[in-house]
Image (cartoon, rainbow, N blue to C red):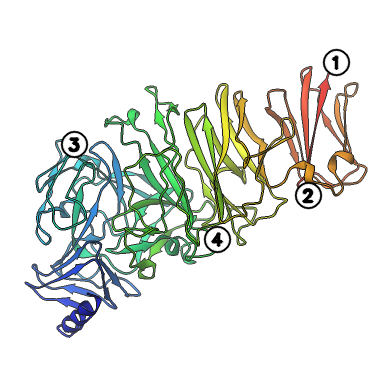
Amino acid sequence: MKSVLFIFYALFSFSSLFAQLYVSNNSYVYNKGTVVYARGNVELNGANSNLYLREEGQLVQGTTGASTNRGLGKVSVFQEGSVNNFAYNYWCSPVGNASATIGNEDFGITMLHVPTTNVSSTPATISSTTYNGTSGASALTIASYWIFRFLSQANYSNWVQSAAATNIAAGQGFTMKGTSGTDATNVGEITTNNPGSAQRYDFRGKPNDGNITVGVAANNFTLTGNPYPSALHVNAFLLDPTNTDCTGIAYYWEQDKTVNSHALLAYRGGYGAFAPGGTGPADYGVYVPAFFSSYNIDGTLNVTGTSSGLAIERKYAPVGQGFMIKGRTTGTPVSVTLRNTHREYYKEAGAYSQFERVSNVLNQTQPIGINSTSHIRLNTIINNVNTRQLALTFSPNATDGVDRGIDAMSTDSNLTNDVYFFLDNEKYVIEGVDYDINKRIPLGVNVSGNSTFKFSLVQVVNFSESQDIFLFDAFDGSYHNLKQADYEVSLPTGIYNNRFEITFKSEALSIVNPINENIFVVQNNSSQQLQISNPSMMEIKSVTLYDITGKSLFNKTKLQIKDSYEFSTASLSEAVYLVKIQSSDGQSFSQKIIVSSK
């Protein structure tokens, strides 16, 4: 098939002085399950010039600048949604309006069709009077109310309704709810048009091509995605050295599809995070699923429910896939650019590309490839109801700070019960480190009410099977080997950013200059001071004081190397407290003290 197609290119290339792939009026190219590559531009010259991409056939172009595609003809490419009429998919169109104008043009949902044969289709019915999209025999109704973009610019960041307007620029993502009903029409693809909650859409228009610039703003999200009629190498896009205006992380919307309501208060959804990794485009990256949240009738956050648990490979974005990116937090970010060099012929049926899926499986883990990013996954079950998943990745390119494309910030800043990596005073769901057996990775916990947290190690990928992985609890100085058993703890209301750590060895393994033999702690109640003696002049990283419930009362850091330290306890009530001291070499020491006025 490939050889036939390349011969076909040659025949049509010489038909025009301007187009590298030229299709004259009343002619077509039919590509089934392979790639059409045009080194330059594409001209679908007449209103009846067509390029059909079927059974995951794709169009890849080699233009190095702005698109010069033109013509009244259309490319036709299929993609299947994965939601019913109550839930959203995030999209990014591979086509725009078809005209003689040179370059990419805006898209609107009036360009969507429903297939009737392998080459013929019927325009979708666009309804502004209903909230429900419907599917029937070779028929499709789209509810235009749910078509929104999310745009970020220097002084602007908001959802903007497009409805049926043709105003969605190339590279801008959009939301669209799915359909109810089914369509058993078989047009020669793997499945029928709609076996149920999986509507097939026929995108018809001028194929997008070339450099596509998308605006971003500091610390704000932008809805973008794959704007081409081919796969997008997400790693190449996010890690492109010219795209430093974004954090290098892609966020994918996941929604509980069992909630059959259009009411905002009933929604349950969130954003999973994909970090491409620290070794460049060849890395396979790591994805962690969304932590579903919903809202109470008074507008407050309701955290009852489970994580979606979707385990999806995200290295390649298939045709039509939309996702969020975030502008970097420093400076004045302006834009990022999608390029043809980020395109690749990769089928969705492959191991590393999936459109958002229907399944809801709680404890799925990402499939393991031979070159998968080295990482571990930690699940925390909250109150035996919610599950928060975190991933700790290992890369020689990672630092102990925030690294672009490696560390993924959490989108759930307001959850009242949550677990997260605490990095640079922010919450993260993916953290990358350069592995060192002495590393200690802080784990934060946010608690509302008396809640239970069960920590589990659910997956170890391309990391030493013999290496122990501990959860350290500073409240009592205990280490818990998660490779041997889960660790469950009950916590009262509070924020615990200094209590828990992931470590790779327990204190018992620290035999050189042990901290507990060189640090002496005394509570001097007559002077109302906590006194710490350090005769060996060890370098102290932090001193943290906890009450008996485990709540952190103070955390002293950046301490100079001294032979003694004093901290006032005058404001403390009479009670038992726990002092935790951590040295710069990763050792820690805990001791109880009694504050008394007697």
Q: What amino acid is at disc 3? A: Asn
Image position of 200 with respect to 525: above or below: below
Q: Which residue is mark 1?
A: 597
Q: Residue at x 33, y 67 (%)?
A: 345
Q: What amino acid is at disc 4? A: Gly
Q: What amino acid is at disc 1? A: Ser
Q: Earlier in the sequence, mark 4 or mark 3?
A: 3
Image quadrant of residue 299? Answer: top left
Image position of 232 with respect to 290: above or below: below
Between the C-alphas of marks 3 and 1, the distance is 69 Å
- Residue 46 picture location, percent across and down: 10, 71
- Label 1 SS: loop
Q: Earlier in the sequence, mark 3 or mark 1?
A: 3
- Label 3 SS: loop
Q: Which residue is mark 3?
A: 132
Q: Earlier in the sequence, mark 4 or mark 1?
A: 4
Q: Decide if residue 545 is on the left or right side of residue 303.
A: right
Residue density around tag 1, few if under 14, some if 14–19, many if 20 or more, within 10 Å: few
Q: Which residue is mark 4?
A: 278
